[in-house]
Every structure is written in C-alpha cells, then in structure tokens.
Amino acid sequence: MVRLRMTDAPALVVEDLRTSFHVRGGIVRAVDGVSFRIGRGRVLGLVGESGSGKTVTGFSILRLIDPPGRIDGGRILFGGRDLLGLSEPDMRQLRGSRIAMVFQDPMMTLNPVLRIDTQMIEAVRAHHPDVDRDEARRRARDALGQVGIPSPEERLAAYPHQFSGGMRQRVAIAIAILNKPDLIIADEPTTALDVTIQGQILFEMQKLCRQSSTGLLWITHDLSVVASLADEICVMYAGKIVEQGSVDGVLDRPAHPYTYGLLRSVPGAQARGDRLYQIPGMMPSLLALPSGCSFRPRCARSDGVCLALPDLTRLSPGRDVRCFHPLHGEAA
C-alpha cells in the first residue's frame, strides 16, 4: 500500500499522559507517562498485548474515562488546545465531528432501537445543522458504500440487529468517517472482518487520510495490519511505550526484546514445521508490577541493571527504546 505523505503541523500531540484506576486493591496505572504525536495525513500504529494500555490511551484522548478511572496528568494538544482543559460541552462538540472513534464493539456506537439512517443523519446534523436531511442521507449512503456495504440505499432503512457483527463494524466505521474528522481513533476496528473487507477498509482509511489530511491512531495487536497501514509505530507494555519509531525501522530492526518477541510470535515468522514462538510468561498485573523494567521477568537479556527503571532513550533520530540492553536489530 502507498505510504502517506508527511505534513508539518501535527494532528495530535500527547505529552506525558497518565491515567489510573483507583480500585480496592490499589492504584492501576493503565497509562503511565505516554507521549507521541500524529502528523496530519499520517497513521500511528499503537500495538501491544491485551492489557498493555492501548485502549485506555485512546479513551483518555477523548476523555471517556469513567470512575474509578481518572486522568492524572499530561497534555493532549489538538488544534492548538489542550483537551484536558476543555469543558465537557466543548468536548461533546469535538467528539464525532473533529475527532471520531471506532470502538472495538460496534454496539457501543449503534443504538439498537434506531434505524441506521436515523443514526447517521443525526451524526451529520448534530455538528452541521445547516445540512438538510436529504443531503445528510446522501452522505450517509455514500459512507456506507465506502466501507463495502452492499445496496447502501436499502440498508439505510435497516436496524443494527439485521446486520452481522462484521457489517455492524463497517457501519460504525462509516459513522466515524462521515464528518471527515481531523483525527480518527480506531480501536481494533477490523478484528471481526474477513480479509477482503479488511483490505478495503484499510484502503479507504488511507485514502481519507491522504485526501483530507486526517490523522489516524490505529490501535491493534495485528502487526501485519500495522506493517501495511502505519507510518509510525508505538509499542506499549504495562502502560508504557517501550519502543517507537518509523514502522519500517521498528519492524525490520526491533530494538526492544518485547518488540522482537512480538514479531517472532507472528504466524509465518518461523521455519516450516517449527513450533509457533511464544513470549515466556504473562504480562504482570498492573497492581503488582515488578521492580525496575516491567518486562524483566520475561526477558532473556535481563540482569541486575534491569532492577532500575529504564528511561525512553533516543537511539537515532525518530527512534526511541526503553531498555538497558537494546537489540539494535541483531538476533536475541
């Protein structure tokens, strides 16, 4: 697929974002000092195992964290404004208009008792009251066609329960692109789709970014999707970014042992007949993180130095890693 062009002004800048959940057992630091930026017309892939903090990062950007969770600090700069300082009415104006989110579960987006056309027309007119219903309906029909819904004019009259799970997800993606937002946050949006439709969705998302200079944060565990879609990549583990850089640089020459392990775990990365590689152990509970490097108990390269907490260190321009013993691309 074609790489998207770089533009100067960022669509989003996240600086030292910290989000925690205060539960009976203690404090869960789900997002712990995360920083990144997304350029206009660029795609950032945020990858990691389940529980690494990817989805909470996306929810934090839109300020959709409910108690007992709270955003403890940092800055989220969008259009020159810090979203953490905006009022809730101002945030409601941004959500769905200038910032859109595709949730992993489409039923978080769709109202089960309203027809698809009603929901999509409302999504347009809520932010563009000058648009009449006929024009809003046309935009809704075109958006459904973009994501591969057959007979979009007819399907506008359907209810969510009349669609399969994959079709509902396509409708949710159509609603996200409806107002041509400046930023889209997509949380595992193609997990329920077959490979052919997935390819079509990725193409349409790339085209939207290229033509409208939309920034895209793509949250996923699927490295093959990131390889074909993203320009930059951030790898998360236990609430922190452990490696970030260009997608080609990180995937071709992983520096962090965790990134290297993820790549070795991809089916097809092994010689024919070899067992599928698995990173030893499990991600630790965020209530009981090990001292020092969180990946230390699972890492073959760990030693006494790793009992201290590593900082995110610049390896080269645009390439950072949080490790005392980076691989620099050689085999582990």
Image: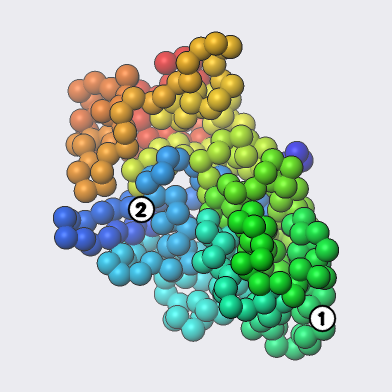
Residue at 16 percent across and 55 percent down: it is: 25
Asked if residue 124 shows in the view, the reply is no
Kind of residue sitting beneath label 1: Glu
User: 179 and 133: which one is in front?
Assistant: 133
Q: Earlier in the sequence, mark 2 or mark 1?
A: 2
User: Where is residue 242 shown, x and y percent of the image?
Assistant: 40, 38
In the image, residue 178 above or below residue 17: below
User: 256 and 103: which one is in front?
Assistant: 103
User: Where is residue 115 shown, x and y percent of the image?
Assistant: 67, 77
Q: Residues within 10 Å of mark 2 (few under 14, many from 20)?
A: many
* Residue that numbered label 1 is attached to: 135
Q: Quadrant of the N terminus?
A: top right
Nearer the observer: mark 2 or 1; the answer is: 1
**Does residue 103 appear to the left or right of 208 in the view shown?**
left
Q: Residues within 10 Å of mark 1 (few under 14, many from 20)?
A: few
Residue at 66 percent across and 66 percent down: it is: 162
Q: Which mark is residue 31?
A: 2
Secondary structure type for disc 2: strand
How far apart are the two marked residues, 2 and 1, measured between alpha carbons?
A: 41 Å
Kind of residue sitting beneath label 2: Val
Residue at 67 percent across and 37 percent down: it is: 228
Q: Which mark is residue 120?
A: none
Q: Residue furthest front?
A: 162
User: 287 and 99: which one is in front?
Assistant: 287
Residue at 28 percent across and 53 percent down: it is: 29
Among the 4 quarters of the image, the one containing residue 65: bottom left
Q: Quadrant of the C terminus?
A: top left
Secondary structure type for disc 1: helix
User: Where is residue 331 shown, x and y percent of the image?
Assistant: 47, 14
